[in-house]
Image (spheres, helix red, strand yellow):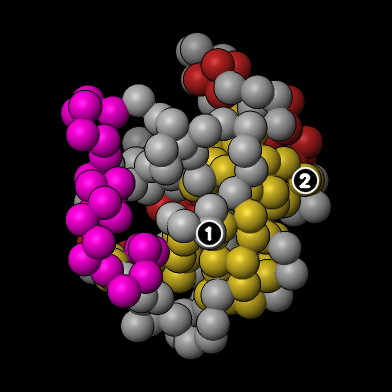
Amino acid sequence: MQGLVGLALPGQDSASPLGGFFERVVKAGVLKENIFSFALAPGGVGELQFGSVAEAAVAPPKWLPVLPDRPGEWLVKGSINGLERRMLLDTGSSTILGRKEDVLPIFEKLQDFIDVLEDPDGSIFAVLKDSSKLPTFTFTFGDFSFRLGKDALSYGTMPDGRQALSIMGDVIMEKFPKDVWIVGDAALREVVYTCDWDGKRVGFSPHKNTIVV
């Protein structure tokens, strides 16, 4: 799966004058609750539930309000390894992206585990020194914290055989406010996350493989 479109809140540009897919579902009044819930998984297997929390959740969601700063986007407060930022939840992205000046200090604290490399465009990424020794990346949303596992951290294999990580300091983030990160499927597969259209909030629940901290 490369990502899903049509699930943005009102306010984001739509290719259709009728609005996005889920906006039209809401207007049709066919759901008991106007929510959708993701339980992503490695290997392309997962669950997208409309109208209720995904069955993979093993606990009720812990809710956070959507921030009003960027209409149409599922944007919430969160942190990665203690760095507090606004997190844009994006199922259209397979990676986790922050500004280079945010990502580099996080990488530098993990140099026992990773080497930091730079792309020709100035973006930075990291590769594992030893695939059996994983660095710790912890996301916190409200009072819910979870750690990225091996599958979530893996983005691909370099020509030299080393594993590249899914967290990057990408120059594309210069187009966004300085305190915004894009949190894609690499992190979201580690939890069940539920978007409440009417309540303008996002809920996070563990599933059976979530590494809760």
Q: How many marks?
A: 2
Residue 25 on the magenta segment? yes
Q: How far apart, in angstroms, are the residues tagged by discs 2 and 1?
A: 24 Å
Foreground: 1 or 87? 87
Residue shown at 55% from the left, 66% from the top: 203
Q: Is residue 193 above or below residue 11?
A: below
Q: Secondary structure at mark 1?
A: loop
Residue 2 on the magenta segment? no
Residue 116 place in picture, x, y as percent: 62, 34
Residue 178 place in picture, x, y as percent: 70, 24
Q: Secondary structure at mark 2?
A: strand
Residue shown at 50% from the left, 12% from the top: 121
Residue 23 place in picture, x, y as percent: 30, 46
Which dot, 2 or 1, sits closer to the camera? 1
- Local packing at callout 2 (Cα closer than 10 Å; few below 14, some 14-19, many 20+) is some
Q: Is residue 94 above or below residue 18?
A: below
Quadrant that contains the C terminus: bottom right
Residue shown at 45% from the left, 65% from the top: 194
Tag 2: residue type? Glu
- The residue where tag 1 is placed is 199
The magenta segment: 14-36
Q: Earlier in the sequence, mark 2 or mark 1?
A: 2
Q: Is residue 152 visible?
A: no
Foreground: 37 or 122? 37
Tag 1: residue type? Gly
